[in-house]
Amino acid sequence: MAVAAWAASTAFTVGDIRRASTEQPSGLFFRCTTAGTSAATEPGWPNNPGDTVTDNTCVWTGIVSAYEELAKVNPSAIIELFELRLESALHGSNDVYRFHAGSNADLTGNIVFNSQAYSRVPLKADGFEYTNTGTLPRPTLTISNLDSTISALLLVVNATTSGNDLGGAEVRRIRTLKKYLDGESAADPNAQFPQERWFVDRKSNETRDAVTFELASKFDLAGQKIPRRQIIANVCQWKYRSSECSYTGSNFFDANGNTVGTLAQDVCGKRVSSCKLRFGNNAELPFGSFPGAGLSQ
């Protein structure tokens, strides 16, 4: 049975289960663990199972109904769904493709969840497990290409951004249980595990049979520099007299710090001392480098 939404200024007893009135990416439900009356406005719901939130005199604890179902002797089958979301600027459209492998619970055809149809497509998805090694997972998604559908999609996308190969497209991994699919007796779009959101990092393989994509988290910044420019101690990287440099004065100096008479002769030496000549010894300097850095890389 679908879970009712939270209601304002309502008396709740211990054990009552409610969902947020708006869709929550976490997929959580909330069990009343301290009886009381709810507030006039909805609380800020927690994102993790077991976390609590105080709602006037009530206290709610985050739960996932799907987890509770798995604790049963004969739980319903886990269904894994995928959404591929394009971005217009990169891929020429904002189309959303929904599909599932159809390998669980003998679901060999298309299915519907949360009023969205998911097409049965042979695929293999693995590598989603998190470990304690300190590195983020880089899952792979292999999709059947027997009818050249994926190759055709890549051609369309690459016509918008050459060589893109769906790079940057969002992949949502949605897991629920068979009993919660539309058309089932316990159909409930809110009963799902927390959604996982990944992005296509690269196309790693394409054949006539299948196409494999490597996925990455939004937080996976391999090869990026922090900040995203070189850390140089003693050479200003700003363009002189630009919005970054901000100097617009009429005191002119050459690269060696000698006073000159015209703007045409004015050249910044790119040193802290050059900044001080123009802005003053005790002024805040817009120096575009990192004087505190001990090494140049």
Image: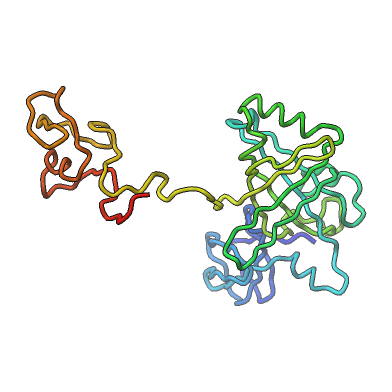
The residue lying at 17 percent from left, 34 percent from top is 255
Its colouring scheme is rainbow
Residue 283, position as x, y percentages in the image: 14, 47
Q: Nearer the viewer, residue 221 or 174?
A: 221
Please identify the quadrant where the N terminus is shown. bottom right
Residue 26, position as x, y percentages in the image: 64, 58
Residue 230, position as x, y percentages in the image: 38, 45
As displayed, is residue 193 above or below residue 168? below
Q: Is residue 209 rendered to the left or right of residue 30?
A: right
Count of labels shown?
A: 0
The residue lying at 11 percent from left, 50 percent from top is 282
Q: Is residue 98 rendered to the left or right of residue 110?
A: left
Q: Nearer the viewer, residue 23 or 11?
A: 23
As displayed, is residue 8 above or below residue 234? below
Residue 107, position as x, y percentages in the image: 90, 51
The residue lying at 57 percent from left, 73 percent from top is 59
The residue lying at 17 percent from left, 41 percent from top is 275
Corner quadrant of residue 252? top left
